[in-house]
Image (cartoon, rainbow, N blue to C red):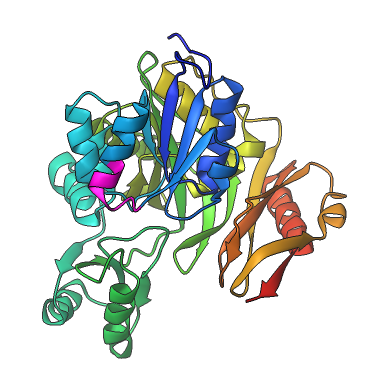
């Protein structure tokens, strides 16, 4: 591996597709190694664009716009940070010789819940909840009757929990259908209906495919989601050795099937020693923000090293870690933040403000990080820090 000089003729270039908070932390890691980053998003001044060498605003669901930008910049690596991308364009670019991270197949499968669920359950043979797909209200109601209640309903095309709901009784069936349609990527479409598994907890197992070290794993991350969206996470999450080995086996099998090099966020349901595959992301995971304080290498550094083929050595710090998000409450522009001086009086804590230029209800604006002697202490401190930070929204 030979790295060039940024902004010079021999620069090593990364084209980042999606420039949110995860992309921002990844870009900071690339800057430390002198890699030139071109950050792309659908709006100006996205978090990663603020720390990249150059930025573009395009419609990333428009394959031709992606291709035009790739031909112009000729990056060494194309790194997707979000799911709302024309993945067919990435497949075609990979065939032309461009390096898509972790690979175009992985990005294409995981952006569509039909593809990844069928790959996991039907081809790889992983344990999953029972599921059906439906594209009409009639088929949807039939699927609900076959799966039974309670059931989980999600748009096939969505991310970060958008459009997801749990149907507990018949009065909620049509409401869940319309909610999924309204929050799907694009204009409605197919939904997935899943059996509700009465699990004890859900984990994210960050799984790393490397060129020279095989498959590596970070300690399991526990998390809390609100309306399907990450709110809080902690590491390590306690679980039996049997369950952990099953989780690693599932994560390795699905990432081997997807291929490529980089970090994957594998979401798993656990009940006792039983483990079910849920979903997977071929990139750093939002719940993995906790690794900024809990590990010697964050998930962002690990992802970069795996992409470049550099050695990776993962270990926990001496203390447990936790993260807790703080959110906006309304629509506004140029928000301000108060309470940092009080929040950071709590020892072994950090704050990351994402720098998003606008707010909307429930939008993640930053995250509090904390270390503690126990997971419980770290979680308490992270929540306390987040509570002290106030997002000041200027009315539009």
* Residue in the foreground of this view, choosing between 360 and 36: 36
Q: From this viewpoint, is residue 312 visible?
A: yes
Left or right of residue 162: residue 226: right
Left or right of residue 226: residue 186: left
In the displayed structure, 256 sits above or below 59; it is above
Residue span colored magenta: 59-66
- Quarter of the rendering occupied by the C terminus: bottom right
Q: From this viewpoint, is residue 102 visible?
A: no
User: Which residue extends farthest bottom?
Assistant: 171
* Residue in the foreground of this view, choosing between 286 and 129: 286
Q: Residue at x 18, y 27 (%)?
A: 96
In the displayed structure, 185 sits above or below 29; it is below
In the displayed structure, 293 sits above or below 388; it is above
Residue 48 drawn at (x, y percent): 54, 43
Q: Quadrant of residue 100?
A: top left
Q: Residue at x 54, y 43 (%)?
A: 49
Q: Residue at x 55, y 36 (%)?
A: 52
Residue 213 drawn at (x, y percent): 39, 15
């Amino acid at each position: 591996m030979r790295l060039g000089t940024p902004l010079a003729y021999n620069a090593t270039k990364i084209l980042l597709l999606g420039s949110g908070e995860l992309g921002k932390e990844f870009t900071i890691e690339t800057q430390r190694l002198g890699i030139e980053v071109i950050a792309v998003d659908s709006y100006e001044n996205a978090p990663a664009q603020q720390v990249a060498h150059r930025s573009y605003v395009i419609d990333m669901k428009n394959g031709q716009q992606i291709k035009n930008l790739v031909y112009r910049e000729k990056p060494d690596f194309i790194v997707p940070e979000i799911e709302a991308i024309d993945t067919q364009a990435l497949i075609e670019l990979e065939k032309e010789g461009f390096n898509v991270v972790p690979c175009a197949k992985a990005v294409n499968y995981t952006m569509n819940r039909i593809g990844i669920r069928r790959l996991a359950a039907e081809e790889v043979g992983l344990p999953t909840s029972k599921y059906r797909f439906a594209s009409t209200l009639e088929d949807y109601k039939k699927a609900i009757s076959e799966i039974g209640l309670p059931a989980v309903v999600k748009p096939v095309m969505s991310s970060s929990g958008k459009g997801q709901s749990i149907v507990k009784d018949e009065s909620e069936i049509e409401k869940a259908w319309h909610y999924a349609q309204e929050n799907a990527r694009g204009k409605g479409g197919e939904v997935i209906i899943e059996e509700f598994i009465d699990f004890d907890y859900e984990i994210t197992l960050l799984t790393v495919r490397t060129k020279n070290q095989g498959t590596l794993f970070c300690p399991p991350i526990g998390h809390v989601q609100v309306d399907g969206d990450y709110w809080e996470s902690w590491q390590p999450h306690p679980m039996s050795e049997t369950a952990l080995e099953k989780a690693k086996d599932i994560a390795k099998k699905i990432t081997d099937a997807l291929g490529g090099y980089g970090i994957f966020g594998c979401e798993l349901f656990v009940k006792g020693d039983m483990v079910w595959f849920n979903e997977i992301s071929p990139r750093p995971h939002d719940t993995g923000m906790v690794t900024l304080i809990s590990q010697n290498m964050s998930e962002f550094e690990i992802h970069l090293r795996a992409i470049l083929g550099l050695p990776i050595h993962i270990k926990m710090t001496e203390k447990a870690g936790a993260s807790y998000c703080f959110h906006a409450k309304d629509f506004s522009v140029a928000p301000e933040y108060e309470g940092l001086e009080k929040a950071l009086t709590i020892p072994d804590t950090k704050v990351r403000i994402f720098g998003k230029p606008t707010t909307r209800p429930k939008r993640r604006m930053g995250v509090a990080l904390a270390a503690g002697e126990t997971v419980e202490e770290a979680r308490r401190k992270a929540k306390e820090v987040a509570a002290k930070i106030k997002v000041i929204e200027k009315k539009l």
